[in-house]
Amino acid sequence: MVKLDIVSDPICPWCYIGKTHLFKALAEVPDHPFTIEWHPFQLNPDMPAAGMDRREYLETKFGGKEGAVRAYAPVVEAAEKAGLTINFEGITRTPNTLDAHRVIHWAGIEGKQTAMVHALFKAYFEDGRDIADHETLADIADSVEMDAALVRKLLATDEDAKDIRDRDAHSRKMGVNSVPTFVVANQHAVPGAQGPDLWVQVINDIKEQLASPE
């Protein structure tokens, strides 16, 4: 197997699009060699724990309503091409994602990390749910067959919060400054929401290398 590390944030639309492209390729080549692990990156590490109003966040970040519309136009187009329905109107708050990353980490311990990542993307981008809210996170955990009561209990503590921050900082020190970033075999970085065709080519190239004698 070949390790595929994915650095992402569950409120990053390009991460959702990039994940969708990747998994289309994985479905096309079901005997792919990848074993996947997700890693934390906070787009807004200084976001208040309670998050903030979505419109205020976007207009502050992009210099007003028109700037926000311009910035998100390519996202909307790329999402539609990927077959995703992103309900931007339904997203009322931009959350702090530290706790979401903690739940992704705990899901990884149970072998349910990708299912949790997908559930968080859907909850945020399609259902407009606040994925900083502990009850919401516990409910999403339950949907991927994790122990919601345990997740709720852990979220009430600082368990693994420092680890998430440290891993985020480590990725930045290694040169990751935008997400998604995919790292193949701990050697080759593939930045951005690359299309399924590129991933199919990468997978086939790796399979050829693994099949050829040294």
Image (cartoon, rainbow, N blue to C red):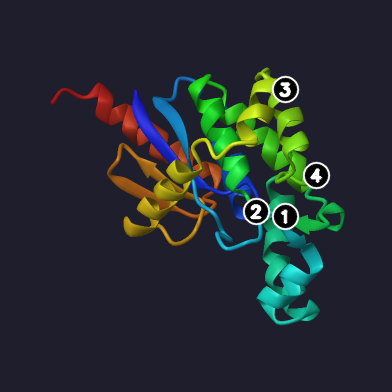
| Circle on res. 129 | 4
Mark-to-mark CA distance, 1 and 2: 7 Å
The number of callouts visible is: 4
Residue depicted at 69% across the width and 33% down the height: 119
| Pointer 3 local density, CA inside 10 Å: few below 14, some 14–19, many at least 20 | some
Residue under label 2:
96
Q: CA distance from mark 1 to mark 4?
A: 13 Å
Closer to the camera: disc 2 or disc 4? 2
Q: Could you say which is closer to the camera, residue 4 or residue 51?
A: 51
| Amino acid type assigned to the residue bearing label 2 in the image | Asn
**Residue nearer the viewer, 75 or 204:** 75
Q: Which residue is mark 3?
A: 142
Cα separation between marks 3 and 4: 15 Å
Query: Which quadrant is the N terminus positioned in?
Result: top left
Q: Residue tagged by mark 1? A: 50
| Chain-order first, disc 1 or disc 2 | 1
